[in-house]
Image (cartoon, grey):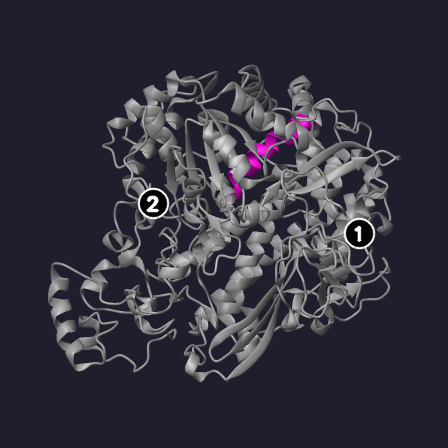
Amino acid sequence: MRAVEDALGITIPDNARIIRNLISGIQYVQDHVIHFYHLHALDWVDIISALKADPAKTSALAQSISDWHNSSTSYFKGVQDKLKAFVEGGQLGLFANGYWGHAAYKLPAEANLMAVAHYLEALDWQREVIKMQALLGAKNPHAQTYLAGGMSIPIDPNSQNALNAGSIAFMKKVAGEAHAFVEKVYIPDLLAVASFYKDWAGHGSGVGNYLSYGQFPNDNESNTANTWLPRGIILNRDLSRVHPVDHSKVTEYVTHSWYEYSDGDEKARHPWEGETKYKYTGPKPPYEYLNTDEKYSWLKAPRYDDKAMEVGPLSRMLVAYASGHKRVQEVVNHVLKTLGVGPAALFSTLGRVGARGIETLVTAEMLPVWIDQLAENMKKGDLKIHNGEKWDPSTWPKEAQGYGFYEAPRGSLGHWVKIKDGKIENYQCVVPGTWNGSPRDAKNQRGPYEEALIGTPVANAEQPVEILRTVHSFDPCMACAVHVLDPEGNEVTRIRVK
Amino acid sequence: MKFLSDDSLDEGPESMVAIGDKKVSRRDFMKFCTAMAAVLALPETFAGTIAEAIEKKQRPYVVWLEFQDCAGDSESMLRASKPTISQIVLDVISLDYHETIMAPSGKQAEKSLMDVVKNQKGKYIAIVEGAIPLKDGGVYCCIGGRTALDIAKEVCGNAAFTINVGSCSCWGGIASANPNPTGAVGVGEAVPGITYVNLPGCPMNVENVTATIVHYLTFGNLPVLDSRHRPYFAHGKTVHENCERRAHYDAGQFVRQWGDEGHRQGWCLYEMGCKGPVAHFNCPSVRWNGATSWPVQGGHGCIACASDHNWDVAYPFYGRLPKVPGFGIESTADKIGAGLAAATAAGLLVHGIGRAISPKKDKEEGGE
């Protein structure tokens, strides 16, 4: 969308910018909470241990860290009874064959029970708060109101078929519920869990370069650098300097990817000149191993100025922190102080988990601000949602090219488009999963996942929960395979991570 | 005085009902069964039959496979409201394998899958999200070194039946859009001979998944399917038939530009390219996210996401459909349109009354 708007020189109306910010904002909040509780927590929380917890002590623990209303002894007893009936029923479903009882689980039984209760609460909460996106985007997932040039959701305070004062009230209510859960449940849980796993501030560091395209525009310029979360790059973990971002320095290698380039696979290409021509050279399935000296991945290897970059909440928070973003600095400093660690702890698996929580809180705080902006425009009579000047392809130049920067919850997303004779000639997406999950490039530089796993301690190679902690901390978008080899190179085990 | 209210269903905090080995409140349980009767388009009195059927049975084992997908259908599953996702996975089914949300990974995850495939052979339900690529020996989607096809043959081949969720597992979806570089197809085509239900959509609507499972538990068979294996209860009517803006279509009131007066007043999106007249889906009645909205309510036309190969046949999104057959008031509208067609070139893209009362721009918006 932004790439096409950039190519055609379309400036979107202010309301479209605000609605897009709200759709993206509530998605950050909801998606990060789902990631923490439903995709990542079980790497840190031993569900079965929760059966041994004392509900009264759990209640005391919960009340000591938050004034969230669901915190009575009987509440936790109810959750424990439900869990007990479930386990004794013998149909463990999603929780069957977990690594329960593994030595790497450090939480006391009471903290585990508290986390199980919040796992269930978060399942209900996420369904409700995403209704803000359903209102603005018509449905979730896969919102359907985006148009090149604006949005399709109409605004009119005097219509029952458009966003009106009732919609403002509904969004305010949802934003309040979103913020309350993050402030009173997610953040306290995050800090409580992290305090038992501080050693994970020393693992999973990765490539040490962090990229953010910037997110939540404050004005309507195409690819504006005036974004609420700033654009920038941190190199070599040096927070004293934020480097600018220039889209022309983004390139992709296919040296170790199952594609071929017309002028050879050793040279990287900018996405406008990007090619996507499959060339599978791997083993014939079924297979056990992939040879990483050859091509071994369907992901291309994106590089910025020839360097591997980590993308995601940690990158955005580091860039914001180093750029002097006041609210981010306050929350980051508060979290570091509470855990008794320094800024160096951010460059780690734990830092990634923490940064996601910090970003959730500061984003939840912004939702009412954007809702007010929309209400203010409505009040002024500004009902414009779409710029239709370039809607008809006959108004387009014969040839055009553009790019669009966006920060998805899991990281930097760039689209590059070339348009010719009213049709797309080339379209390339460089997505967060390829930045973080990148295979090696022509110089044999590793991507963030590969680099972060080096040196990870694994207590029991048959149950490598430690590997999951680091890979899941990136919020991977796909299943990937990790093979654990002993020092002689023999495979000990193989795990799939999703 | 005691008013009849929602709470009158409640027989007090102690009124619990056992489902398998679990207990849930009678009130929540009956609400769920009533909602299911509604989704299945059954009289409300069937709620009792549904309740009885669920209470009797062990939760059915379910495994969820992902192939060429974006996890959009998994996300949709998490948005379930009737019942909620925690009720589904704790009370209604035993979801033993789902790569994204299950606790174990690797060997332990494989064990969960194989335990069900071997121990519950012929009794479990397989749910598949994502397309299966057949080209070049299936190398375009391998999991743990096995092709999607190989896995689907074993898992779907040994299931009681398979539910394909989302358009990708139904007929290849976006992965199979022209020129279909990986040879992506749906599960029904990839694994011939299996019993399956298609629940297309991008993503599928989770209320239809639950209703299909409850239908099976209640009546002991699968719902009646159309020629594309879609249940009639979800895909038996067009979006147009149940659309809340139908009256505006019949009255010839059409949106002309995004944000114009008609758009703000909820007029018909037909001229903005809506594919509702040719799309079969219960989107307008079930809606999304606890009935919060649906595309037409959001001011955007239907893109026929639940129609076979919509990316190839329902495109361009913003191009107006050719002549839509009508009835009742529209037959009049159509005649007016037909009369005008004679005077216009090639007779394409004609509807009628909207054109008759409000001259259209020369060019089709959205460009063709």
Provide the residue designation for mark 2: B286
Front of the two marks 2 and 1 = 2
Residue B17 screen position, x and y as percent: 40, 18
Q: Which residues are magenta?
A: A112-126
Against B88, residue A228 (above or below) is below
Q: Residues within 10 Å of mark 2 (few under 14, many from 20)?
A: many
Q: Mark number for residue B276?
A: none
The reply to whether residue A190 is in sight is yes
Q: Quadrant of residue A340?
A: top right
Q: Say which residue appears at 29% left-offset and 23% top-offset.
A: B48
The chain containing the residue under callout 2 comes to B
Provide the residue designation for mark 1: A333
Residue A123 screen position, x and y as percent: 54, 37
Q: Is residue A468 left or right of residue B113?
A: right
Front in this rendered view, residue B6 or A289: A289
Q: Is residue B162 left or right of residue A354?
A: left
Front in this rendered view, residue B51 or B195: B195
Residue B96 screen position, x and y as percent: 54, 27
Q: Say which residue appears at 41% left-offset and 40% top-offset.
A: B188
